[in-house]
Image (cartoon, helix red, strand yellow):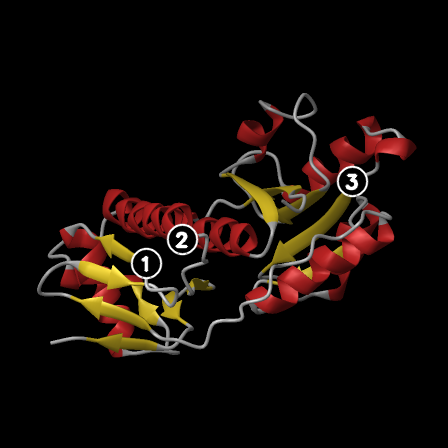
Amino acid sequence: MHPLYPVAVVEDNPSLLADLVEFLGMRGFAARGFESAEVFFEVWPATHFDLLLLDVVLPGASGLEVAQRVRAQRSMDAQVGIVMLTALDANNDHVLGLESGADMYLSKRSSLEVIEAACHSMLRRLNRSEATHPPDNSHEPWRLNPLHWLLKAPDDSLLSLTHAEVTVLCALFNKPGEAVAREELLARMNKKETLSSLRNLDNTISRLRRKVHMACGIELPVRPSYGRGYTFTGECETNT
């Protein structure tokens, strides 16, 4: 098993936090989310992180204050990479971020792939050996049987699904390669758009990904679309 690199994501927007943690977890990082600086400091420095992704504007202490405190306490031989994420574009805000100890400064409009690339770049700067991802040699489609609540993986493994999992996959299989909004997925599940329902949706997809991986060792190609919803990125078929 190749190593996972611990990343702390500090972001007060629950949807964006879930997207980042989910995506980075899919890309070989051990990502952990924190909704505020205060929650992050409950576990740091007792818990080590190679990288920090910090929202600049946070309730309570800001991301800039987090970076300053981390830089003040971390020894040089245990350096941590810091990437700031912000909706602000002003040059002086970038200067403040870099002066506070940040290594990179990215707009929240950056794609998840750009954020991932920034994380890998930081690992190289820190002289960490990067994890490699196992190649996907399968070209067979994922096959969903919604009538019998079954999912057939490309290696022919057959998985029994829950009603919620079938409902979500039906919506994603109907639009392969396209982002399906969380609101649409919740509507398919007959749920109102509440914070509790959004978390339940994210948990449903996380459990489904774990179930698939435990059953056949293959990554289910469902990826979060930053701030929007989820996308099924693999080949898929629905059996009627």
Sequence-first disc among 3 and 2 = 3
Classify mark 1: helix, strand or loop. Answer: loop
Q: Position of residue 77 (x, y in %)?
A: 90, 32
Q: Residue at x 63, y 44 (%)?
A: 1
| Residue picked out by circle 1 | 157
Tell whether label 3 touches label 1 (CB within 8 Å): no
N-terminal-most mark, 2 or 1: 1
Disc tally is: 3
Look at the picture and state if 140 lies above or below 209.
Answer: below
For image coordinates 70% across by 52% down, the residue present is 131
Disc marking residue 80:
3
Q: Is residue 108 left or right of residue 224?
A: right
Distance between mark 2 and mark 1 Cα atoms: 6 Å
Labelled pair 2, 1 in contact (Cβ < 8 Å): yes
Label 3: element kind: loop
- Residue contact at pointers 3 and 2, CB within 8 angstroms: no
Question: Which residue type carries mark 3?
Answer: Val
Measured in 3D between alpha carbons, the distance from the residue under mark 1 to the one under mark 3, in whole angstroms, is 41 Å
Viewer-nearest residue: 230 or 35: 230
Q: Residue 72 or 211: which is nearer the viewer? A: 211
Asked whether, in this view, residue 214 is left or right of residue 237, the answer is right
Nearer to us of marks 3 and 2 is 2
Q: Is residue 159 left or right of residue 226?
A: left
- Residue tagged by mark 2? 216
Quarter residue 73 falls in:
top right
Q: Residues within 10 Å of mark 2 (few under 14, many from 20)?
A: some
Q: Residue 190, position in %: x, y?
A: 11, 57
Residue type at mark 2: give it: Cys
Image coords of residue 28 (percent x, y): 60, 52
